[in-house]
Amino acid sequence: MADLVVVLDGARVVGVGSHAELMARQGKYAELYDVQAASYR
């Protein structure tokens, strides 16, 4: 559980927010989360 997630791509910050906010943006965080979650399906 985290109140705030910071997503890095190399040395660049590419996303900041809650899990729900980052998933709604469909960015790098959502992409990586979906790849990881797929292994549990």
Image (tube, grey):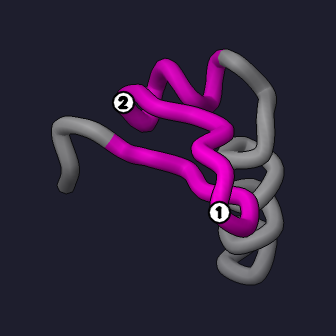
Q: Residue flagged by tag 1: what amino acid is it?
A: Ala
- Nearest the camera: 7 or 26? 7
The percent coordinates of residue 4 (x first, y second) are: 26, 38
Q: Quadrant of residue 26?
A: top right
On the picture, is 12 further left or further right than 34? Answer: left
Which dot marks residue 22?
none
Q: Residue flagged by tag 2: what amino acid is it?
A: Ser
The percent coordinates of residue 32 (x first, y second) are: 75, 60
- Nearest the camera: 10 or 23? 10
Label 2, residues with CA under 10 Å away: few <14, some 14-19, many ≥20: some
| Magenta highlight range | 5-24
Q: Quadrant of residue 24?
A: top right
Which dot marks residue 11?
1
Number of marks: 2
Residue shown at 37% from the left, 45% from the top:
5
Q: Which residue is mark 2?
A: 18
Residue 10 part of the magenta segment: yes
Q: Quadrant of residue 8?
A: bottom right
- Nearest the camera: 8 or 28? 8
